[in-house]
Image: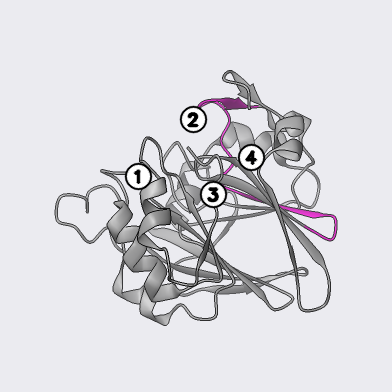
Amino acid sequence: MSLLACNAQDVKENNVDTFTSANGTKINMHCIKHGSLSINVGGKWIYIDPVTDKVQPATDYTTMPKADYILVTHEHADHLDAKAIEQLTKDGTTLIVNPRSSEILGGKGDTMKNGDTKKMADFTVDAVPAYNISADKQKFHPKGRDNGYILSIEGLRIYIAGDTEPIPEMENIKDIDIALLPCNLPFTMAPEQLTKAAKTIHPKVLFPYHYGNTDIQQVVKLLEGSGIDVRIRQYQ
């Protein structure tokens, strides 16, 4: 991946994982960077937390397929980027945001709060809590404001945690095929916390993401023998 910019060619050639739904549909997950990813389901494009230049390398979304769906977990600039949303939006794009992000965008988007469920044409999305529990971190992600999302696509369940620590609500997150969990101190989880969260949820496949300068190989070592397929992609 270029040190200066990433575009459609980078995303196509690097960090793509393919899964198959219960109905035989191919689901391609594309790692873009940091907390940004896209998912292609039968030609439909889902983008999560797309960001242009607030996180380097800068991403030019004009070179990528337009979005059928865009999901934003919360308001921070490394997750909510009006420029990226504009570049990806076409007629018919569905934008899903937490309430605070909608306010920042001037009321745009379909809002979801913790506990809400929306049934789309191509998948179902559940908004789940994402917040800090450590006393010194609660100012970053207070309880009740931000979302994680669970996408259910033809029986395949993908948990995108957003910015969170190992919260009690994770005990209720079941039957996850693919999980993306953050590992970026001081804002989210240390490797030991991520390991605890992963063992609570126990996905079949785990992508540590949004990991910044963390030595992410620590997670691989800590989860040896857990039965979880840990995959490291360029989510710095």
Mark 1 → mark 3, Cα distance in angstroms: 30 Å
- The residue where tag 3 is placed is 107
Mark 4 → mark 2, Cα distance in angstroms: 15 Å
- The residue where tag 2 is placed is 55
**Corner quadrant of residue 128:** bottom left
Left or right placement of residue 4 versus residue 224 in this view: right
Which residue lies at the image location 40% right of the left edge and 45% below the top edge? Answer: 216
Mark 4 → mark 1, Cα distance in angstroms: 24 Å
> Could you tell me if the residues under marks 4 and 3 are in contact, i.e. CB atoms within 8 Å?
no
Image position of 226 with respect to 78: above or below: below
- The residue where tag 4 is placed is 85
- Circle nearer the viewer, 2 or 3: 2
Mark 2 → mark 3, Cα distance in angstroms: 24 Å
Left or right placement of residue 163 versus residue 7 in this view: left
Does residue 131 appear in this view?
Answer: no
- The residue where tag 1 is placed is 184
What segment carries the magenta color?
41-59
* Residue type at tag 1: Asn
In the picture, the disc for residue 151 is none
- Of residues 36 and 9, the one nearer the viewer is 9
N-terminal label among 4 and 2 = 2
Total count of labels: 4
- Circle nearer the viewer, 1 or 3: 1
N-terminal label among 1 and 3 = 3
- Circle nearer the viewer, 4 or 3: 4
Secondary structure category for the residue under label 3: loop
N-terminal label among 2 and 3 = 2
> Could you tell me if the residues under marks 1 and 3 are in contact, i.e. CB atoms within 8 Å?
no
* Residue type at tag 4: Ile
